[in-house]
Structure formats: structure tokens, C-alpha cells
Image (tube, rainbow, N blue to C red):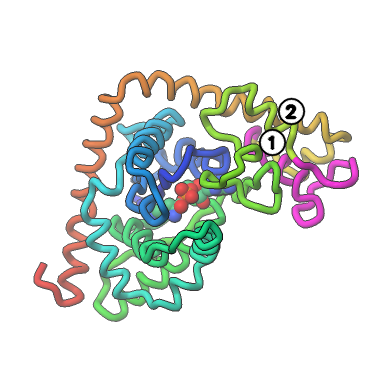
Amino acid sequence: MTRIFSGVQPTGHLTLGNYLGAMRRWVAEDQYRADALFCVVDLHALTVDHDPARVRRLTRQAATLLLAAGLDPERCTVFVQSQVDEHARLSYLMECTATDGEMRRMIQYKEKAARERERGGSVRLSLLTYPALMAADILAYGTDEVPVGEDQAQHVELTRALAVRFNQRYGQTFVVPRATLPAVAARVMDLQEPTVKMGKSRARTAGIIYLLDEPEAVRKKVMRAVTDAGSDVVYDREERPGIANLLDVLAACTGRDPRGLAEEYDSYGALKKDTAEAVVEVLRPVRERHAGLAADPSYVDGVLRAGAERARGMARPRVDAAYRAVGLLA
Ligand code: TYM
């Protein structure tokens, strides 16, 4: 059976980008067609300046949102990264497989390191080695497919390279995984800055739709979205990034094609109104189920405990095999 692994970082409140780029497919397809694991990667959240209480809160919230979005713990494994030691154990072997140059070439590293420096902060070493931990997450489970948004494709490519290199040097140990990207909304852009990805850790929040935003807040943010010069509705990501983004979001929410949708609109206002309502309807059940689940944290904790145990059982033999393969007395 196909093995699927993916994850989300608890570095901020989850956004519409996380949902349309990744979570929606986990819920609607991946958990039904494969043996799938979905992980809140809390160790990754420590790679930038962090507040311990906030990380703890956001880890619970992310796990609760995964269940609220529709992941069914009877069908897939939902767990928290730090509760399964194998991730950190294998990450070290990945650091011993990757090179310094490979890590420094990662776009996410360059962007996040620049942001930390701009703020006058220092860059944690773990931000550089972040992709080694991510490779460990994926490779520990013999993963075939990694459903992610476009921004993570480079990390999955590096993971593939590390798997191949490790297998060549030390013998067949890891499955070589591949990224799967959504057909639309692989890169949802910030509504205020449509040339920049909608990201949960951005400081300016006016262009970001959070999964737990109230309907009125969603409407306001979409209606105030920055649009492009001109007034005709065409799908052109280069020349008309603001309108293309709205069309992508509407297409993803309605299961339509963004180009086909463009032909149906002749004003920005009408497009914004329909996009706002489509987003509100997509998020409504998630928000409602989240409220119910958040009222019973012991249920979520139980799911995570069981998930971690199952995940540990799956990862342990392969990580032990990798330790032995490199010459350790595991
Ligand atoms: P993270 O937490 O930034 O995002 C979680 C998922 O959401 C996708 N995504 C988006 N898709 C479309 N448009 C956007 N604006 C947008 N923003 C985020 C991401 O591509 C991702 O699929 N490094 C990962 C977490 C991770 C991971 C892993 C993922 C750690 N280990 C192993 C897969 C497998 C990250 O920071 O995702």
C-alpha cells in the first residue's frame, strides 16, 4: 500500500494556504487511498525564536484543526513529531549524509535567515539543518508520496537526493519519495502582497486568512485584497497576480478551473464577493468542528498518544536499520 507522510509546523495559526495547498487533499483523498501519517512538526518550530507556551498552544491547536478539517484517526495516523524519538535520531544521520552547500542553497533557509537578520536576531544552526530533520520525518516511514504545497517541493527534492545517496553508500535502506502538488492553489499568495506567499509567520496579517477567522473577518480581508491595474478579469499569474490569486482560491474552493472562472466575471467586485463566500463556506465546518473538539482536549490528547505509538512502531525498525547500516551498534 502506498505510504504517505506530510506535516505542518506550529509556528503560527494555520492559514488558508495550508488548507488549500495541503490539508484539503490529506482529508479528501490521501487518508482514503493510502496508509497516511500526518504530523505536527513541533521540533521544526524551534528553529526560529520561539515562546515555549505559544509553541505548546499552537501544537495542540494544529492537531485539533487537522481533526476538525476531517482527518479520521481510524483511517490515518495523526501525531506530534517530538513524541516520536526516531525523527531526531534519524535527523543526525541525515546531517551526516547532506552537505553544508546543499543546506545553504535552500530557498526557505535563505528567506528565513534574512528575516531573522533583518530583525537584528541571530540565525539558529537548526534553521540551516532544518531539511535534514524534514528528510528524517519522511524517510523514517518508507514514504512514497509527500503531499505538500509548492514551497516545500525543494525540500522534498533534497530528501530524494539524500535517500539515493544513503542507499548507494550504505545499502538499500530508504524508499525514495516524491512530492505531490495540488492542481490549483499550490501557492496561495498574501491578499495584500500577491507576489508573496500567504504564510502563517508573517508579521502583517491583513492579507492572511486564518482557518479560525470569523466569516466577517474573511469577507473583509477578501474584499480588501489588493487587485491589479485594469478591470477585466483574466487569469495571468505574472501580469495580474492579485486577480490570479483570487481566481485560484475560488477555483480551489469550488473545484473549478481558474481560467474557466475568469471568463464568467466582468468585474473585480463580483469576483471578490463570490470568492469571499466560497472561502467562508469551505471554512465553516472546520471552524464549527474545531469549537467542539477544543472543548474536549482529552480526546485530542488521546488521539495524539495513540498516533505517536503507532508511528513509533513504524519508524523504529527502519531507523535502527539505518543506524546499523552506517556502522553504529544499534
Ligand atoms: P508549513 O507548516 O509551512 O506548511 C504546511 C503545508 O502547507 C503548505 N503551504 C501552502 N500551500 C499553498 N500556498 C501557501 N501559501 C502555503 N503555505 C503553506 C506547505 O507547502 C505545506 O505542505 N517544512 C514543512 C513542514 C514539514 C514537512 C515535513 C512537510 C516538516 N517535515 C515532512 C512534509 C513532510 C513546512 O514548513 O510546512
Q: What residue is shown with label 2? A: 274
Q: Quadrant of the C terminus?
A: bottom left
Disc 1, SS: helix
> Relative to 220, is 159 above or below?
below
Which range is magenta? Answer: 226-254
Where, by quadrant of the figure, is residue 214 drawn? top right
Disc 2 to disc 1, C-alpha distance: 8 Å
Q: Is residue 27 visible?
A: yes
Q: Position of residue 40 (x, y in %)?
A: 36, 44
Disc 2, SS: helix
The residue drawn where x is 65% and y is 33% is 254
Which mark identifies residue 36?
Answer: none
Q: Nearer the viewer, residue 114 or 181?
A: 114
Binning the other alpha carbons within 10 Å of mark 1 as few (below 14), some (14 to 19) or many (20 upward) gives many
Which mark identifies residue 250?
Answer: 1
> Relative to 324, is 275 above or below?
above
Q: Nearer the viewer, residue 311 or 207?
A: 207
Q: What type is the residue that disc 1 sits on?
A: Leu
Q: Nearer the viewer, residue 133 or 313?
A: 133
Q: Are marks 2 and 1 in contact (CB under 8 Å)?
A: yes
The residue drawn where x is 40% and y is 48% is 7
Q: Position of residue 79 (x, y in %)?
A: 30, 41
Q: Position of residue 51 (x, y in %)?
A: 37, 44
Left/right placement of residue 243 relative to residue 256 reads: right
Which callout, 2 or 1, points at the residue further toward the start of the chain? 1
